[in-house]
Amino acid sequence: MPKNLTVVVLAAGGGTRMKSKTMKVLHEVGGRSMIGHVLNAVRAMEPERVIAVVGTQREQVGPHIQQLVPEAILAVQETQDGTGHAVRVAIEAVSERLEGTVVVVTGDTPLLRGDSLRAFAEEHEAAERAVSILSGIVPNPFGYGRIVRNKEGDVEAIVEEKDATPLQRDIGEINSGILAFDAEFLIEALTKIGNNNANGEFYLTDTVGIARDAGLTVGAYAIDDVSQTEGANDRAQLAALGRELNRRIVTQWMKDGVTVMDPETTWIDADVVLNRDVTILPGTQLLGATVIGEDAVVGPDTTLKDCEIGQGARVVRTHGELAVIGDEANVGPFSYLRPGTNLGARGKIGAFVETKNAQIGDGSKVPHLTYVGDAEIGEGTNIGAGTIFANYDGTNKHRTKIGDRTKTGANNTFVAPIEIGDDASTGGGTTVRRDVPDGALAVSAGPQRNLERWKERRAAVRDEPPASED
Ligand code: UD1
Ligand code: CA
């Protein structure tokens, strides 16, 4: 890896085509901001220093960058006077004089990979150039700076779309926006660039012509996988890059031993971790920092965000966030796992069950139509159908604690705070307002009364003539 490497990340431009309150580089694909993906690739190069140039909405972008790369230096570009100006601002933000290699990247290329950046920087150093351009051959070069070469094939200049002649516009080799410089040359060259062009901006790309005029070496290194350098300028491009990123992530997981029945409807964020022989059924989104254990089956139609699913577990048609599901456990269909749900090994959370801050022990089951909030349930316990853990008194939340091997009846209400012991039982329709000791049966419904011949008696009442109104 290059010694004394500085990476400059350009993120001061507005991104007006997003038509958004949120700065362009903060828009997310694959569960991470676009600049988050870029910073990840940058970090893989292990640079000496990272300088991020912020400007437009820097109160949003600055803290985000500092959170992801705490050691990054933030350089503020007050007015967006062009990429050359932005890099000058970056250099001025560092007290010492830069030496070695400076790599410039833009903040909006979410598919960029660390190994590609690394290969580019290494090639730049090996060739001992003043400037190297990461170029690409694209079918539609509109909007990009074109790489102009002479008859010998040497790079002469980068010409921007608006400044290009019709002949130059036909050139298919473009500047990705990622460049590598010899630091000493860059510092010198930035003092020489002007803004006499169609945009009235200081172009970083003008350094190429300056190097050529000084007889220094310039080269372009074409990347095979051009989508790595593609930026998203509007929401349609954002969606297209998001789909491509997802396709790559899903393909990689399949190569690593995961069965994905329908890659088209499966969405997996960049930070998700899957284990061998996981099966993902159609319509599934695995988001955030979700981890799925070996042999687990997830889906169809399931969304899990920041969840941890144990080995061999099954999660069917479920929506979950910040939940932990034990090995061989069963969830769904139609379960809603809210934050703090923790289901033990071989446990069950069944159909139309909502859980929140709920510790449910190994082998315990909450099979049907139930709300479990702020609860701790022991091992081997079964909660009857249609049970409500009444955790909220209108002001405060309270906890329910249920022991091991307890069987509660259908249609119960547990009015928290309450404790039900081990090996306890409750009758159907019980409203539990007082603690239930170990081994006890709690019943609260009154004794049943049968009104004999009810149907017959009611019919007789109806046949009577209306009461006279005197
Ligand atoms: C730039 C390149 C072009 C290349 C293209 C690749 C120049 C002059 N042109 O054009 O050759 O093909 O990228 O996408 O460099 N930025 C700042 N401050 C500024 C201006 C821009 O930080 O004053 C940042 C933007 O936020 C963005 C990046 O620099 O991340 C590129 O700027 P942009 O205006 O998009 O340049 P392009 O016209 O696309
Ligand atoms: Ca651009």
Image (cartoon, grey):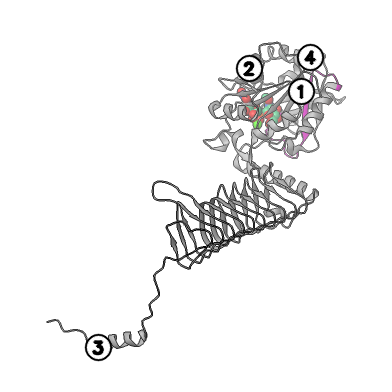
Does the stretch in magenta take in 131?
A: yes
For label 1, the crowd category at 10 Å Cα-Cα, with few meaning under 14, some 14 to 19 and many 20 or more, is many
* Viewer-nearest residue: 283 or 124: 283
Q: Quadrant of the C terminus?
A: bottom left
Labels 3, 4: front one: 3
Q: Which of the four quarters of the rendered structure image does ligand 1 lie in?
A: top right
- In primary-sequence order, the first of circles 1 and 4 is 1
| Mark drawn on residue 180 | 1
Q: SS of the residue at dot 1?
A: strand
| Spatial separation of the CA atoms under disc 2 and disc 1 | 17 Å
Residue at the location (76% across, 48% down)?
253
Labels 1, 4: front one: 1
| Spatial separation of the CA atoms under disc 1 and disc 3 | 100 Å
Do the residues under discs 2 and 3 have CB atoms within 8 angstroms? no
Q: Quadrant of residue 55?
A: top right
* Viewer-nearest residue: 307 or 61: 307
For label 3, the crowd category at 10 Å Cα-Cα, with few meaning under 14, some 14 to 19 and many 20 or more, is few
Amino acid found under the numbered disc labelled 1: Ala
Disc 3 target residue: 464
Do the residues under discs 3 and 4 have CB atoms within 8 angstroms? no
Residue 64 locus on image (x, y percent): 59, 30
Labels 2, 3: front one: 3
Q: Which residues are magenta?
A: 126-145
Do the residues under discs 2 and 4 have CB atoms within 8 angstroms? no
Disc 4 target residue: 213
Residue 256 locus on image (x, y percent): 80, 48
Amino acid found under the numbered disc labelled 3: Glu
Identify the residue at the far right of this view: 152
